[in-house]
Amino acid sequence: MALPYDVQTYLLDKENIRDTVIRMMLAFDDRATSTLIDSVYAPEILVHYPRLLFDYQKKVSSEEWAKMLEHLLDEFDTTEHIVQNLLIDLPQPGNPGTQRPDRCKARAYAHGLFYKRDAEGRPSVMARRQGGGYELELVRVKEKEEAGENPWRISELKASFHWQDRGN
């Protein structure tokens, strides 16, 4: 029989989920394909990107998806992806009937800042800014948990596009 979902485990789950989502943003900017594969995405991920971004809707392996992202931002010298207002949907702990979930949903706003280098080589020319959101489903990967790692991985990613400004 599974143990009840206690406050300590609930808080650890929330923080691990937050870390996974933030790690995705940092990996985009670092162009860290291996981080996306090993520490962010579940082995298979269902991806929904709207037509206004790059129109991609498919269930793929984390490796295929991460490798597809590798050169998506090559036209920019540096990028900054920011996630905020992260809302994680986990059951409240403490009720004897509440069990620890194997999956959950999360939502967040996401902003992207994209720069090119100026004549002196500094990444200071704003090429584009855009904002949108993510609807995510995350799963708890037993093997990662047993290895003492953050077990939460993104298994579904639905991006929405809210606005965009073009730079100079």
Image: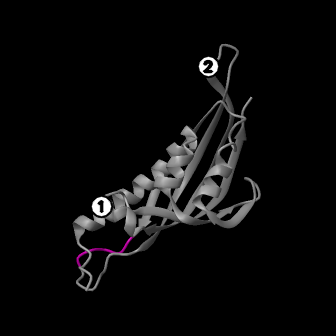
In the image, is residue 66 above or below residue 113?
A: below
Inspect this view and state whether residue 129 appears. Answer: yes
Q: Quadrant of residue 146?
A: bottom left
Residue at 77% across, 58% down: 51
Q: State which tag comes first along the sequence, 1 or 2.
A: 1
Using the rendered view, name the quadrant where residue 162 is placed.
bottom right
Q: Write the start and end of the magenta stretch as one range.
A: 90-94
Answer left or right for 3 relative to 116: left
Which residue in the protein does label 2 denote? 122
Q: Position of residue 150 (x, y in %)?
A: 36, 58
Q: Is 7 left or right of 70, judged from the image as shown?
A: left
In the depicted structure, whether residue 66 falls above or below residue 128: below
Query: Dividing the image into 4 quarters, which one contains the N terminus?
Result: bottom left
Residue 132 is situated, as x and y percent measured from the top left of the image, at 62, 53
- Look at 27% across and 74% down and name the residue there: 93
Which image quarter is the C terminus in?
Answer: top right
Report x, y in % for residue 4: 24, 79
Marks 1 and 2 close (CB-CB < 8 Å) = no
**In this view, 113 is above or below 140:** above
Q: Would you say the magenta stretch is mainly helix, strand or loop?
A: loop
Q: Secondary structure at mark 1?
A: helix
Badge 2 crowding class, 10 Å Cα cut-off, few under 14, some 14 to 19, many 20 or more, is few
Q: Secondary structure at mark 2?
A: loop
Please state which amino acid type lies under the numbered disc 1: Leu
Q: Which numbered disc covers residue 12?
A: 1
- Graded by Cα atoms within 10 Å as few (under 14), some (14 to 19) or many (20 or more), the crowding at tag 1 reads few
Amino acid type for the residue under numbered disc 2? Arg
Tally of marks: 2
